[in-house]
Image (cartoon, helix red, strand yellow):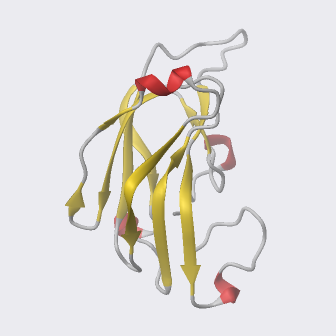
């Protein structure tokens, strides 16, 4: 799973800046159609939410043509380093779309000087398998296409 957004918005990292509350896309595959690149396969076992302040209260995901139900995350505020671990993992094949949606609770704070937004980390738990090292052996933080 890849992010090609600017670094200001959390691109090429699992740290994201949210400037609006409500339902929104949290993580997707790369390229057109939000697909996983060719010669990649992902084993997805869950998601970790290591930020101290939790702002995401619900997630749901789509893998290819399969849609999965919503998962309520409000209870994770009671834990120090919360994570969601699926009973059975999911496999995301090459050239298959992946989308993770979530609900960000508001209100979104505005700091002195006009800075708007809050940061949240969403880290997938699992493994990514690839066929060619040259696709992933580039610069750290660069988008994988």
The residue under the point 53% across, 22% down is 77
Among all residues in the image, which is located at the extreme top?
112
Q: Position of residue 17 (x, y in %)?
A: 59, 35
Instruction: Name the residue nearer the viewer: 35 or 112.
Output: 35
Q: Is residue 138 above or below residue 61?
A: below
Among all residues in the image, which is located at the extreme front?
87
Q: Is residue 59 above or below residue 80?
A: below
The residue under the point 39% across, 70% down is 91
In the picture, residue 103 is in which quadrant? Answer: top left
Among all residues in the image, which is located at the extreme bottom?
132
Instruction: Name the residue nearer the viewer: 92 or 109.
Output: 92
In the picture, residue 20 is in which quadrant? Answer: top left
Instruction: Name the residue nearer the viewer: 129 or 96.
Output: 129
The residue under the point 51% across, 48% down is 47
On screen, residue 141 versus residue 82, left or right, reads: right
Q: Position of residue 89 (x, y in %)?
A: 40, 62
- In this rendering, does residue 79 appear at all? yes
On screen, residue 95 versus residue 134, left or right, reads: left
- In this rendering, does residue 30 appear at all? no
The residue under the point 39% across, 50% down is 100
Q: Is residue 65 above or below residue 123?
A: below
In the picture, residue 12 is in which quadrant? Answer: bottom right
Q: Position of residue 60 (x, y in %)?
A: 32, 44
Q: Is residue 66 above or below residue 96?
A: above
Q: Position of residue 26 (x, y in %)?
A: 45, 44
């Amino acid at each position: 799973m890849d992010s090609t957004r600017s670094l200001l918005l959390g691109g090429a990292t699992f740290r994201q800046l949210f400037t609006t509350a409500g339902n929104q896309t949290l993580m997707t595959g790369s390229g057109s159609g939000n697909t996983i690149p060719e010669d990649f396969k992902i084993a997805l076992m869950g998601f970790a939410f290591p930020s101290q302040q939790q702002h995401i209260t619900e997630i749901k995901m789509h893998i290819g043509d399969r849609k999965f139900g919503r998962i309520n995350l409000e209870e994770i505020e009671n834990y120090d380093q919360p994570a969601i671990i699926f009973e059975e993992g999911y496999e995301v094949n090459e050239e298959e779309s992946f989308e993770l949606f979530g609900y960000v609770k508001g209100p979104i704070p505005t700091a002195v000087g006009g800075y708007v937004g809050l940061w949240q980390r969403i880290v997938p738990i699992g493994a990514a398998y690839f066929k060619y090292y040259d696709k992933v052996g580039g610069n750290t933080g660069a988008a994988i296409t």
